[in-house]
Amino acid sequence: MENYLLLLIGTVFVNNIVMVKILGLCPFMGVSKKLETALGMGAATTFVLTLGSGSSYLINQYLLGPNLAYLTTLSFIVVIAGIVQFTEMAVEKISPPLYQVLGIYLPLITTNCAVLGIPLLNVQQKHDFFESLLFGFGGSVGFTLVMVLFAGIRERLEGADIPDIFKGSAIAMVTAGLMSLSFMGFSGLVKL
Amino acid sequence: MFTALYVMAGIALVLGAVLGYSAIHFKVEGNPLVDKIDAVLPQTQCGQCGYPGCKPYATAIAEGSADINKCPPGGEDGIRKLAELLGVEFKPFGEGAAQPKPKSVAFIDENICIGCTLCIQACPVDAISGAAKQMHTIIAAECTGCELCIAPCPVDCISMVALPQTIQTWKWQYPVYTMRQAA
Amino acid sequence: MRLLHRFHGGVHPDEHKRESSELPSARAPLPSKLTLLLQQHIGAKAKALVQAGDQVLKGQMLARAEGNMSAAIHAPTSGTVLSVELHTVPHPSGLPDLCITLAPDGADKWADHAPFDYRALPKEELLAKLRDGGIVGLGGATFPTHVKFASGPVQTLVLNGAECEPWITTDDRLMRERAAEIVQGIEILRHLVSPSETVIGIEDNKPQAIAAMQQACANTGIEVVTVPTLYPTGGEKQLVKILTGKEVPSGGRPFNIGVTCGNVATAYAVHRLVHHGEPMISRLVTVTGAVKSPQNFEVLLGTPIAELVQCAGSALPGADGYIFGGPMMGLHVSDAQLPVVKSTNCIIVKSPQLFPAPPPALPCIRCTRCAQACPADLQPQELYWFAKAKEFGKAQEYHLFDCIECGACAYVCPSHIPLVQYYRFAKSEIWAREKEKNAADAARIRHEFRLERIERDKREKAEKLAQKEKAALSAAPADSAPVAATPTSSDDAAPASPEQAVIAAAIERAKQQAAQIQPKNTDHLTPQQQADIAEIEARRAHIREIAHQPTESPKE
C-alpha cells in the first residue's frame, strides 16, 4: 500500500513527466492557452494513458511474452492509436466545443511521447499490472496538473504588459522553464 | 515469425472491431460549429467577405476554406472572438481588403424614388418598407448598413448616413493615462 | 436597541462638512433662465408637451412621462418657453441632449395645484401621481420613485440619511430644518409598501439632524438609527447591510431581500407633492468648495450653476472648475452654464489648493489595498487587470456589475491609478456589445424569415400554377371536340393527348382571330393600288401552293 502511494506521489510530483522527464511537451505548449481546454486535454490524456498503460502491460505480459519482445513498441503504438481514435469519437459526441478547440491536438495524443513513454517505462521498470495502471494514472494526473497550472499562468499573462518581442510562445517557454525549475524542488521528496 | 504476425493481426482485429462499433455508436450529426461561428458574426449580410451572407461565410470558416479576417462589420473584435472560438491565432485585416467603417444606415431620398421595388428585393433583412409604385422608405431600426440596396437603385436615390453619436449611444473610452516615467 | 452590522471595507476621507453645514439653508433667487433636461431620471426620456413661445405657469407639466419607467418634468417658475432643443448637459460625454429652456417672467405664478388625500386613492393612482409629479430618487441615482415603490409589501423600509460623501450637507440641513415634513413623506411611503419596520440611518457626524429626526419620529414607529461615519455608508446596499444585516445578492436589488431604500430628500419631495400639490421643481443643493460663503440653497431645477455660485458669494480667485456631486463620485465639469438637475445634490467649486491634480499613475503593485477598501467585497485589482486587458468575460466572472463606482479603491491606491475609469469603460463596453449582439440576433431572424418567405412564395406560386394547369387540362377534353370537327389543312392525325388538344385549341383560336382580321382601307382604291394588291395576292397564293406540296428529299 505504502509502496503504491509512494509510486503515485513520485509520478505526480517528483518525476513529473512534463516538468522533470520532459515528455509530452507538444500538447503542453499547444493546448494550454485556456484553462477549460487544458482541463479537457488533461482528462482525455488521463483516459488514454491509464487505459493504454493497462492494456499495454497485458499485451506485453500475455500476448508478446519473452519471445516477441521486439514487438513491444509496435503493438503499444497500435493500441494507443486505437484508444485515441475511440477517445476522439467519444469527445466529439460528448462535447463538440471541446472537440473543436482541441482540434488537431486530440489525434496528436497518439504521438505524445509521454503516452508511449509510460508503457515503455513500465516494461523497463518491470511494474506489475496494478503498478502499471498506477504509473499511467499518476503520470497523466501529473500531466493534467502541470497543464492546468500552466494554463492558469498563461491566462494571467494575457493581460500583462509583455514586451512585444516576448509575446506568445517566447514568454510561454520562459514560464515553462521556470516551472520546471520549481518542480526540481520536489526532488528528494520520494526516493524511487 | 508467424506468431508475431498472428499477434499483431489479432490486436488489429480487436481494435478494428471496437473502433467500428464506436464509429456507429458515437455518430455525430450535422456541424454545430457553423451555428457557433454564425452567432459571432454581426449578421449584416453584406457580402463584403466574398460570401452571399453570414451563414455561408460561417460554413466556409468551419470547413477551413475562409480566413477569419474577412468581416469588416465585425471589426477587430469580431476577429478576436472568432480566433478564440476556433483556437487559432488572431489575424488583422488584410492590407488591401475591406476595412471596418463607422456604423451607418441607408436613407432614401423620397423626391427621387420611383417605387421600382428593386431595393426591397435586395435588402437581406427586409428593412425597406414599400410596394410597386408606392413610396419606399428605410426602416432605420432594422437597417444593418450592408449597402446592398445602393447598387440596384436605378435612380441612385439611396445614400448611407453615418449614425451620429448621442448621449444614449456614447460609451466610456478606454482610459489612457501617462504613467510616471522613472527618473 | 438595534444591532448594527458592518460592511466590508470603507474609507475615511476628510469630511469638509462644517464649511457648509452650519448656515441655515437659503432660497436662491430667480435665475435669468432655466434649462430643463428631458432626461433627469433613469428610464425613457420625457416627452415635451410645450414648444417655443408657450407661456407656462409654475408647476405646469412641461414634459410627460414616456411609458412607466419615466417621470414628468415641470416648470420651476412661470414664464415663456424659449426653445426645445439640444443643449450641453451635465454628462461625462459632453454631448448635448434635448432640453426645454424657460425665461422666467418674474411673477412666479403657480398653476392650479392642490393637496390630495393619498389614503383615499388606490395605490396605482397614487403611483401615477408620483410619476406625473416628477418624483425620482434624490439620493443621486434618480430612479423613478413610483417604480421603486410599486413593488408591493416589504419587510423593511430604510430611509437613507447617511450622506457619507465629503463636502455634501444637503440632507443634513434638510433633516435639521424640515424633519416633520420628511416624516410626513415617510408615512406616505409606508402606506405604499406597508413595511413591518421603518428605519432611518443617519451618520454620527450629524448630531443635530439625528436629534431633529428623533423628535419628529416620536410616536410614529419610525426608528432613527445612528450609524458610524464611514464612506460609503450611504450606498444603498451598504446601508441595508448595516441596518438589517442582510446582503443584497449579486446582481440583485434590495427588493430581493424584502427591503426598500429611499432617500430622505425623496420622502420630502413626496410630502410636498401629496400635501401641497407641488411637483418636483426645486431641491436643496450644497454650494461649497472655493466660494466665499459655502451654504445650502433651495434651488429651482434648471438654474445655471454660474448664478448659483454667485449666491454663495461668488467663486474665490483661482477656481478652475466645478464638481456636480461629491469628490468621490461626482462629475467634473468646466462649463458654468450647465443647469442644476434632479440628481444635483452639491456643486463644489474646484481650485488647485482644494483639489490638486492627481499625480501620474504608476503600475499596479498588487498591494490589494483596494480589495481591503471595496465596500462591495470585490477584487478591484483583478477587475483592473481584466478591464485593462479588455477581457470582459473574466471581468464579469469577478462580478464587475456589482461595483457601485464609489471610488474607495482609487482613493486608497498607492499608485494613484484611476481605477473607476477602467470599470466604467468595461461596463459600458459590455453593454454596447450586448446591444450589438441583440441587434445582430434580430437581423439574423429577419434574414432567415426573409429566406423562408421567398421559398414560401416560390412554393405557393408553383402550387397555383400546377392547380391552374390541372383545371385547364380537365376543361380541355370539352374544347377538343369542336377542334377535331373543323377540318384544318395543316393537321396531321387527330390530337393524341390532352396537352395537344389544348395546344390545338389555342392554334384554332389564333386562326379564327386571324381570319376575323379584315384588310383595312379597301374602299376607293386607285387602279395602281388595285393592281399592286392583285400582284401581292397572286404571290401569296403561289407561296401557299408551294408550302402544301410534299418537300422533295434532298439529293444525296
Image (cartoon, coloured by chain):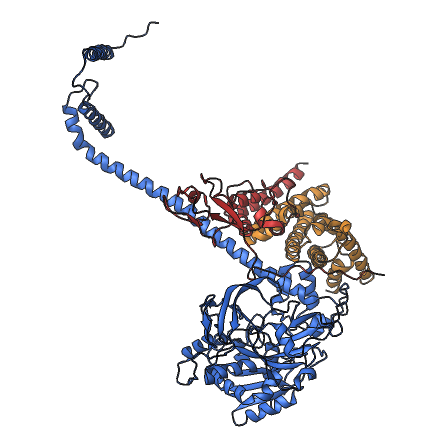
Which x, y percent locates residue C245? 60, 82
- Left or right side of A132 for C485: left
Seen in the picture, residue C50 relative to B98 is either above or below; the reply is below
Number of numbered discs visible in the structure rendering: 0
Please give the letter of the chain rendered in orange.
A
- Left or right side of B177 for C234: left
Which x, y percent locates residue C552? 28, 8
Q: Is residue C263 visible?
A: no
Q: Is residue A133 visible?
A: yes
Which quadrant, please, contains the N terminus of chain A? bottom right
- Left or right side of A28 for C239: left
**Which image quadrant for residue C408?**
bottom right
Please give the letter of the chain rendered in blue.
C
Which quadrant, please, contains the C terminus of chain A? bottom right
The foreground one among C413 and A10 is: C413
The foreground one among C166 and A90 is: C166
Seen in the picture, residue A23 relative to C412 is either above or below; the reply is above
Seen in the picture, residue C190 relative to B123 is either above or below; the reply is below
Q: Which residue is most to the right?
A: B183
Please give the letter of the chain rendered in red.
B
- Left or right side of A150 for C451: left
The foreground one among C395 and A29 is: C395
Q: Which residue is most to the top?
A: C556
Which x, y percent locates residue B34? 53, 47
**Which image quadrant for residue C225?**
bottom right
Which x, y percent locates residue C4? 63, 86
